Amino acid sequence: YFGHVRTFNYVDTREFIRSAKEVLPKFRPWFELHSGDMDWRFLAAMSYQESHWRPKAKSVTGVRGMMMLTLATAKEMGIVSRLDPEQSIKGGAQYIAKLLRRIPDRILSPDRLWFALAAYNIGLGHLEDARVLTQKQGGNPDMWIDVKNRLPQLRQKKYYKTTRYGYARGNEAVGYVDNIRRYYDTLVWLDEE
């Protein structure tokens, strides 16, 4: 279960725990309200990975807000202001729920969630490319452990030139999912404390 914890970053973990105690309570009601069938703590962990719970967060690629929504995704989800914390959380929750619905039914939990998280980060097309590579290489395209080992190959020309969607920073999607899982585990631990 804890295979996603490769290294223990003491400074990052201390900062996360501090933020979980001091910053998260302000936003928790919206995570709970908009999480739907998902544990609200996963949504909160995603938001921390995306923005460190900063409502005005902005990346160089133009994604904005607590859930780092693109303009197109925000529009698709009916979000007027990506910088409004509740709207951003709602938009991110709707988008991850949409991705979960698009993951093939044969993929079971928890792998289903890991795939949806990776798609939130890298895009469904690139995730599908990694699944195809996994199958071609004899792995199980429906198991996260197999696909996560192939996602970094999307950076290598000999692999991405054979894919439908081309180059992608697949290693970042792997780190993204691992971090969210670690943040989620920490939130569960804090609730039990």
Image (tube, rainbow, N blue to C red):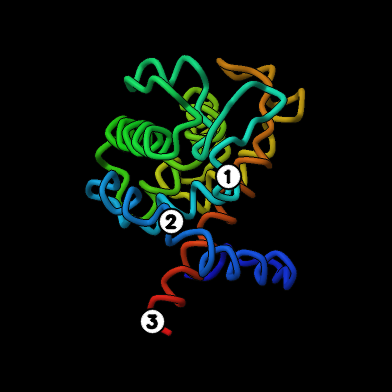
In this picture, residue 171 sits left or right of residue 186: right
In the image, what residue occupies the spot 59% across and 43% down?
51
* Residue type beneath disc 3: Glu
* Residue type beneath disc 1: Arg
In this picture, residue 187 sits left or right of residue 155: left
Q: Nearer the viewer, mark 1 or mark 2?
A: 2
> Can you name the residue that lies furthest to the bottom here?
193
Q: Secondary structure at mark 1?
A: loop
User: What residue sits right under mark 3 in the picture?
Assistant: 192
Q: Nearer the viewer, mark 1 or mark 3?
A: 1
The residues bearing labels 1 and 3 have C-alpha atoms spaced at a distance of 25 Å
Tag 1 and tag 2, C-beta contact below 8 Å: no
* Residue type beneath disc 2: Lys
Instruction: State the image coordinates of residue 175 (x, y, percent, origin top left).
Output: 64, 49
Q: Nearer the viewer, residue 2 or 138?
A: 2
In the image, what residue occupies the spot 51% across and 69% down?
21
Q: Which numbered disc flags the more N-terminal residue, 1 or 3?
A: 1
Instruction: State the image coordinates of residue 158 (x, y, percent, origin top left).
Output: 75, 24
Q: Nearer the viewer, residue 53 or 47?
A: 53
User: What residue sits right under mark 1 in the picture?
Assistant: 54
Q: Nearer the viewer, mark 2 or mark 3?
A: 2
Disc 3 packing (10 Å; few <14; some 14–19; many ≥20)? few
User: What residue sits right under mark 2 in the picture?
Assistant: 26
In the image, what residue occupies the spot 27% across and 34% down?
101
Tag 1 and tag 3, C-beta contact below 8 Å: no
Q: Secondary structure at mark 2?
A: helix
> What quarter of the picture does the C terminus occupy?
bottom left
Disc 2 packing (10 Å; few <14; some 14–19; many ≥20)? few
Q: Which numbered disc flags the more N-terminal residue, 1 or 2?
A: 2
In the image, what residue occupies the spot 50% across and 46% down?
47
Instruction: State the image coordinates of residue 174 (x, y, percent, origin top left).
Output: 61, 46
Disc 1 packing (10 Å; few <14; some 14–19; many ≥20)? some
